[in-house]
Image (cartoon, rainbow, N blue to C red):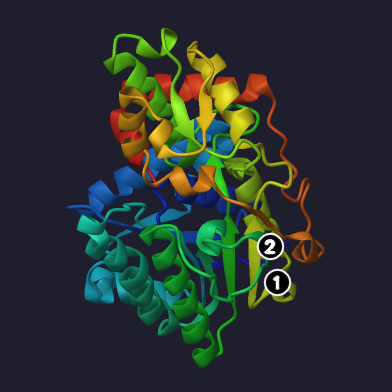
Amino acid sequence: MLAPRTLFITGATGFVGAALTLELLRTRSRDTAYCLIRAGSDDEAQRRLRAALGNAAEAYGASSFELSSSVDRAVAVRGDLLTHGLALSAQDRDRIAAAGPLHVWHCAASLVDSESRMRETVAHNVGGTERVLDLTLGLGTVAFNYISTAYVAGRTIGVAEESLQRPRGFSNRYEQTKYYAESLVRDNCEYEGVPYRILRPGIVVAHSVSGRATGYTGFLGWVLKVAALNERTDGALKRQPLRYVARAETEINVIPINSVVEDCVGIDAAGQATYNRVFHLTNTAAPTARWLCDATSKALGILPIELVDSEAELDPLSLQFHRWTRFERPYAMGRKKFARADSNGLYPSSRHGYCPLSEELFQRMARLAIADYRRNPAQQGAA
């Protein structure tokens, strides 16, 4: 039987964090997770955590027994990434220190990408990571796991390797801050002699079986924007095609949430063999921009999206959408693939990122995303 461990998790109420917390606790039935939650009271923090894990269990088909067992071992600790010491009370800090040694999973991040809010993005993704490191490395951490993004590869052309080498440039502030945070993890952990892992998912989408998700950033967020444009213009996209600036053959590395968390758990289980490494949790069967646009058009019942080479070819409606999707633009024009073959041999996995999307599955993902968003618009921003 596996020995019990103590986990410290940030971002456990977010899209990736909730799914990962649930899977970590489901696969190791003796572990306890202390989850940093921003809330006005301890009771509110625990309610938020329970709700997030419950939503993830429902979306991904976990049994009521697995949910109950996991929730019973998930402890909310009230705090804030933006505050010194993570704003933990002395009592919570002592409780976590006594429960250690810690296996840290830092999942929390800001996906905001605008020059006007750059300070906010830096504060969360760089400053927040530094504060998590400062606190947890002083509490007896034995492994630090950082959830980054494969798109720290930025403007790389060709094959992006699983390394911490700085790319030729970044496409947006989000990528840039995540790269700086990776560097903080490496430098601080090496200085303290603590093993670390940098885990880089692609663009995370819904579950590959249920088609459900608990948050809609990334490409499903893009689909929601197409749907919103059509609705706000009384179905204009059924009468005229949306034109979009993209390279038809560009691979957009969308990866189902269950593949990401399965790989995280497999990497974790492999122990020392996976320490001090970078892992791409990416799709080795990634669809192209052309395929995704065609599948989106069919899912929404609109005219086929036309791909063009430049902004100059856009009509007024398409230009409005172009401005709405500033964050997504670089990913539709990229020319890179993500290496992962070397690291695949270090840990067990049922798929190692091989997740081809059928048209039926993607259309189901899109329709469920729209239905969920209509019920709860706040989900579009869940990270």
Q: Which residue is mark 2?
A: 267
Mark 2 packing: few (<14 Cα in 10 Å), some, or many (20+)? Answer: many
Q: Quadrant of the N terminus?
A: bottom right
| Residue furthest out toward the front | 312
Q: Residue at x 49, y 19 (%)?
A: 367
What percent of the width, then of the height, locates residue 218? 46, 42
Closer-to-camera residue (357/101): 357
Q: Residue at x 37, y 27 (%)?
A: 318
What percent of the width, then of the height, locates residue 66? 58, 40
Closer-to-camera residue (181/167): 167
Tell me if residue 196 comes above or below residue 343 in the rendering. below
What percent of the width, then of the height, locates residue 145? 54, 68
User: What label sits on residue 39 in the rendered view?
Assistant: none
CB under 8 Å between discs 1 and 2? yes
Q: Quadrant of residue 194?
A: bottom right
- Disc 1 marks a residue whose amino acid type is Thr
Disc 2 is placed on an element classified as helix
Closer-to-camera residue (195/217): 217
Horizontal relation, residue 333 to residue 282: left or right: left
Residue 88 at least partly seen: no
Q: Quadrant of residue 345?
A: bottom right
Horizontal relation, residue 35 to residue 2: left or right: left
Q: Residue at x 33, y 75 (%)?
A: 131
Q: Which residue is mark 1?
A: 274
- Disc 2 marks a residue whose amino acid type is Ile
Closer-to-camera residue (267/299): 299
| Residue furthest out toward the left | 40
Disc 1 is placed on an element classified as helix
